[in-house]
Amino acid sequence: MRLLITTIVLLLCTVANAEPLTMAEAAPGVYVHRGVHEELDAGYHGDICNIGFIVGKKGVAIIDSGGSLAVGQQLREAIRKVTALPILYVINTHVHPDHIFGNAAFLADKPSFVGHYKLADAMERRREIYMRNNAAWLGKDAEGSEMVKPTQPVQSTLDLDIGERSLLLTAHPTAHTNTDLTVLDKNTATLWSGDLLFIERTPSIDGDIKGWLEVIGKLRESQPKSIIPGHGPVPANWKEALENEQRYLETLLNDVRTSIKKGEPMESAMDTAAASEKDRWVLFGTVNRRNVNIIYPALEWE
């Protein structure tokens, strides 16, 4: 409770000084801030993923809040440049720190915090390492950041009404992570995919690669008008973007399976798997090696 009060006081004292994030209106009433392509390590600034908000007649729904309290405050200021309507919901698409640590900036607004039904447990399990890493990577900019857990979990699907605007939230099986949630704005048929879709940046696996490939099929079947990815620009052709991601994941999966069948060690596979994709993606060298490190042990047991 003391930590919560301290966070709120810090927010009230500093938010007025925050510079608003730059936003683009991807569809009527749908605003997106595009993060930069940085690694989650030294030099990370907490602003690498796509975050934003949707405005209805009654209020605002935020989709992901950024990697620190400071980024969340900048997002809040950007919202206030557009509307004075209340912030009704803060929706997290999954557990990764670049998507959740801005939540604390909205505590004083008293919204419902919404996420996958496994998100609260995932936050608790990762709390110590995420807090430690954020402090190491962001330094002073990490101050006041806190893991704010969902108060409204999504078991399967959930419709949210923000005033003549309906949002369909879908909790997915384990894919990019075990906490993946998508948000469909029914008014504009705009789908917020979270990190189920990467553009430019190498897709990173923290869940199940086979499950992710299955979810890509489900996203394709939903036939949105446009998709806002977790990283990278909003694609002009979302079908092509999904195909690119699918190609990378299938190539990685097949190459690792081949290495295992040949008896090659994981260290060797980290250098060779999905090498044909190297020039197609940003941060390939580090992210692809981590992907192999995650999926190789699981695939050995197929």
Image (cartoon, rainbow, N blue to C red):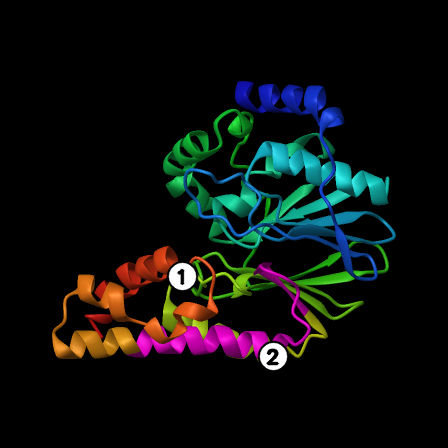
Name the magenta segment's main secondary structure.
helix
Amino acid tagged 1: Phe
Image point 81% across, 47% down: which residue?
59
Which quadrant holds the N terminus?
Answer: top right
**Residue 239's disc number:** 2
Q: In this view, does 239 lie above or below 60?
A: below
Image location (x, y in percent) of residue 90: 66, 46
Q: Can residue 214 be seen in this view?
A: no
Amino acid tagged 2: Lys
Where is mark 1, residue-wise?
A: 284
Q: Can residue 88 be seen in this view?
A: yes
Q: What is the C-alpha distance between the residues marked 2 and 1?
A: 22 Å
Residue stretch in magenta:
227-254
Tell me the mark number nearer the camera, choosing from 2 and 1: 1
Q: Is mark 1 on a helix, strand or loop?
A: helix
The reply to whether the magenta stretch includes residue 49 is no
